[in-house]
Amino acid sequence: MVFFECDCAYRYGRIEVKPQQYPQWMCTLMHWVMPCCGINEQKDWPNSCNLNLYESGGMSVGWHADDEQLFQGKQQDCRIISLSLGATRAFEVRSNWSELDGTVRLELGDGDLCTMEGLVQKHFQHRVPREDKASGPRINLTWRWIVRHAAHCPHARGRR
Ligand SMILES: O=C(O)CCC(=O)C(=O)O
Ligand SMILES: [Fe+2]
């Protein structure tokens, strides 16, 4: 989902998710969530949100970084805000550098907010592992700022 007239699609491996404008309920939710992250003005809100449904513990996301060009997360500081709803699932983070071994594991429960900041996408990977004991479905909303819009998007530099 995207703010205003943005027309950037989100590519997720081989899957392309077409943009949908933020519906009213999303704005209502952001009025509640964003101040928890110190974002008090609507003009500063993230301009995209990806929604993931994990129907059961068998659904997972493998190791990756959110390194899409849209977000420039490997080139510059990049903030990602995620809200978890439903079943508690593990969220694991590991470094790309062998000097920093070990995996950090967080348990993300219903209503938890988690952020990734700075150059985390350059230096770390994250995943939501399969968990056969998970108590049911989980929805994750992940807000990000598109900083490099697709060439066809009305927000692309030079077009607006
Ligand atoms: O479900 C989560 O907490 C993380 C999802 C994720 O890493 C992503 O959508 O890129
Ligand atoms: Fe991710």
Image (spheres, rainbow, N blue to C red):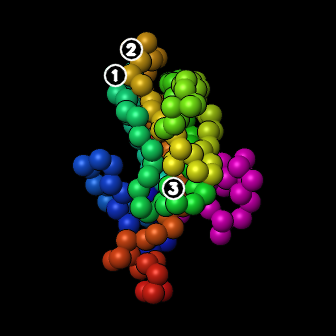
The answer to whether residue 146 is visible is: yes
Q: Is residue 59 above or below residue 64?
A: above
Quadrant, the N terminus: bottom left
From the top left corner, tell me how far across and down residue 92 is, in percent.
51, 29
Q: Amino acid at mark 2?
A: Asp
* Front residue of this view, candidates 11 and 113: 11
Q: Amino acid at mark 1?
A: Gly
**Farthest residue, direction top:** 133
User: Disc number at residue 48?
Assistant: none
Q: Residue at point 62% right, 34% down? A: 112
From the top left corner, tell me how far across and down residue 133 is, in percent.
43, 12
Tell me whether the residue at label 2 lies in contact with that at label 1, contact meaning CB atoms closer than 8 angstroms: yes
Query: Neighbour class for label 1 at 10 Å: few (<14), some, many (≥20)?
Result: some
Gap between marks 2 and 1, in whole Å? 6 Å
User: Disc number at residue 58?
Assistant: 1
Give the overall secondary structure of the magenta segment: helix
Residue extent of the magenta highlight:
30-47
In what element is the residue under mark 3?
Answer: loop
Query: Neighbour class for label 3 at 10 Å: few (<14), some, many (≥20)?
Result: many
**Farthest residue, direction left:** 14
Residue 149 on the magenta span = no
- Tell me the residue that label 2 is attached to: 132
Residue 43 on the magenta span = yes
Q: Residue at point 62% right, 39% down? A: 114
Q: Residue at point 71% right, 65% down? A: 41
- Name the N-terminal-most of marks 2 and 1: 1
- Name the N-terminal-most of marks 1 and 3: 1
- Tell me the residue that label 3 is attached to: 73
Q: Residue at point 51% right, 67% down? A: 147
In what element is the residue under mark 1?
Answer: loop
From the top left corner, tell me how far across and down residue 62 is, in percent.
37, 33
